[in-house]
Amino acid sequence: MAPVPVWRDGSPVTDDQVRSVSNRHAIPVTCTHHGGPRGFANLVASKRDGEIELDPHVDGCCVILLSEDSARVLSEALVGWLG
């Protein structure tokens, strides 16, 4: 069973809601610390007040915030790696 995405307030998010929010994207990923099959975890990436927020467990317990400049550096690195 896949994890259920939740909003910051803990309420569940449906697939339609995730797709309908243009500043939020759910990306299937793997958590090497907690285990589980490939693609089992969800990484939610969203833009909030000029920052990019990465929530690797969709529960707000560990959130990574990137400034727009830092997000551009990450974007350039990913483009370089992926071609």
Image (cartoon, rainbow, N blue to C red):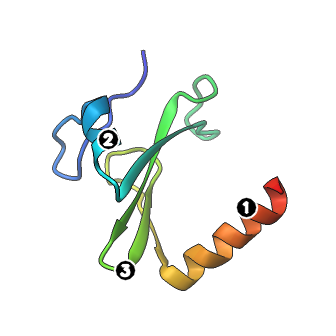
> How packed is label 1: few (under 14 Cα within 10 Å), some, or many (20 or more)?
few
Which comes sooner in the sequence, label 1 or label 3?
3
Q: Is residue 68 left or right of residue 72?
A: left
Work out which quarter of the rendered image holds the C terminus and state it: bottom right
Residue lying at 58% horizontally and 80% vertically, measured from the top left: 70
The residue that mark 3 highlights is 50
Q: Amino acid at mark 1?
A: Leu
Mark 2, secondary structure of its residue: helix
Residue at 25%, 39% (x, y): give it. 17
Q: In this orientation, which residue lies closer to the viewer: 35 or 66? A: 66
Q: CA distance from mark 2 to mark 3?
A: 20 Å
Q: CA distance from mark 1 to mark 2?
A: 23 Å
Q: Is residue 26 above or below residue 75?
A: above
Q: Earlier in the sequence, mark 2 or mark 3?
A: 2
Spatial separation of the CA atoms under disc 1 and disc 3:
20 Å
Element on which disc 1 rests: helix
Indicate which disc residue 4 carries: none
- What residue is shown with label 1? 78
Query: Which residue lies at the image location 64% right of the left edge and 27% below the top edge?
Result: 38
Amino acid on which disc 3 is placed? Gly
Q: What is the number of the mark on residue 18?
A: 2
